Image: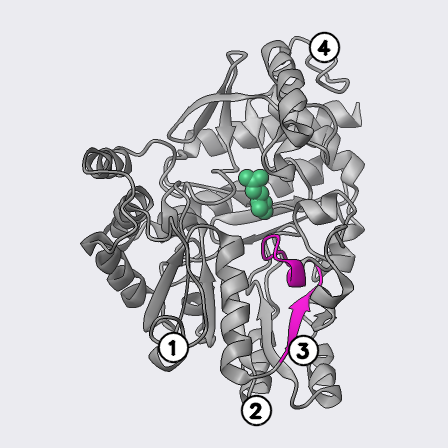
Amino acid sequence: MTATTPALSRPDFRLTRSHEAFSRANRVIPGGVNSPARAFGAVGGEPPFIQSAHGAYLHDIDGHTYIDYIGSWGPMILGHAASPVNRAVADALAQGSSFGAPTVREIEIAEAVVAAVPSIDKVRFVSSGTEATMSAVRVARGVTGRSKIVKMAGHYHGHVDALLVQAGSAATTLGTPNSPGVTEGATRDTILCPFNDAGAVAEVFRRFPDDVAAVLLEPIAGNMGLVPPEPGYLETLRETTAKHGALLIFDEVMTGFRVAFGGAQALYGITPDLTALGKVIGGGLPAAAYGSSTAVMDRISPAGPIFQAGTLSGNPLAMAAGLATLRILRDEAPYEHLESLSARLAEGLDRAASEAGIPHVVQRVGSMLTLFFHDGPVRNHGDALRSDTRLFGRFFWEMLARGVYLPCSQFEAAFVSVAHTVDDIDRTIEAAHESLRAIRG
Ligand code: HOZ
């Protein structure tokens, strides 16, 4: 056993080179990583360093190959290094990588987004999901002239100061829901509600009938593990916000082009006022976006007074990768295929945990899913936090040693891609049976 892995039933699984790389990284990068979720803090041990990725597989610098269920935390819906995406990026690169001036490709991808996403008439491209949600909140405040934002506990909207309150993802994992450096002033207008509790939102409007600019949420929560909206919840939020003149913002950074081509709003038939997009829209390169009706979007600079800008916004390489990805998703509509692969995986994981006699629940929407070590449905952050994270950590490592790379936290969703095969799914389920048996002893 090396120092990098916890006690495993497969002691031959070693991450020697990755351990060296992690030590080296720690000397020059805080925590050795450029985004905290990657550091394996939630599962103990140290991460493998990735050499390359193709299709559904990750290859690390120690010579291991893994079936990948992170997919770069969502973007790689077509799998890694998909040829049409690689070709589009190579063609764009040959023409120059950044101009700081408009390009026709930006119009093409904007047209593709407008055609796909029901609530969007106009769209502004930015470079990260954080920028997209931050800008959407600014627009909501600018348009309504109000200050307060309602956010759901356990939902994660990037590292925006005002939204880093009881945030999901690594903020949950690390137990630092309020980061030092986020001032009280920055979060004074942020009001927290539990997810799936429309009554709590109604209560906010009773207390502050004229002050709420927007209700912001992940329509399908993916950053506290996968937690779907309960029937009627999104509909009620839609009615309540409209009644009080507040905007409804869907953070579809994870769900956009993922659970359906038009995102969760198309899946559930709910039209938000503003939508934040990221991940899949960049096809594996840094691109994100926010969009709304023409009336709202024309309030943004330079059409209107609400300022927002970015040197690399609409970057040609990112637009090329995103456009190639969206065109394939539009033309090949792989969503039924993803649904059947993902259902097979969810059922298999459920069976494996049941046979091992381990309290659990598998929650899934389309190709996003989580096996919670929690007895009963997970409806909100409080439920998610009651999961057995120690058991999750052991399961994670047993799976990794068997060549399956799950998200390295109980509070993240796994992603299935079109590159996964039925054989990959069945091998994953077999690994889950073995892993849980090994844990049970
Ligand atoms: N925000 C991602 C998890 N929900 C993590 C991003 C990363 O570490 O790459």
Residue position for label 3: 198
Between marks 3 and 4 in the image, the one whose residue lies nearer the viewer: 4
Where disc 4 sits, the SS reads loop
- Give the magenta-colored segment's residue range: 147-163
Q: Is mark 2 within 8 Å of ligand 1?
A: no
Residue under the point 26% across and 60% down: 112
Q: Amino acid at mark 1?
A: Gly
Q: Is mark 4 within 8 Å of ligand 1?
A: no
Residue under the point 74% across and 84% down: 203
Marks 2/3: CA distance?
14 Å
Residue position for label 2: 243
Q: Between disc 1 and disc 4, whose residue precedes?
A: 4
Residue position for label 4: 2
Q: Quadrant of residue 381?
A: bottom right
Q: Is mark 1 within 8 Å of ligand 1?
A: no
Residue under the point 50% across and 12% down: 63
Q: Between disc 2 and disc 1, whose residue precedes?
A: 2
**Percent coordinates x, y for residue 153 in the rendering:** 71, 62
User: Is 255 displayed left or right of 221 in the figure?
Assistant: left
Where disc 2 sits, the SS reads helix
Note whether residue 347 is visible. no
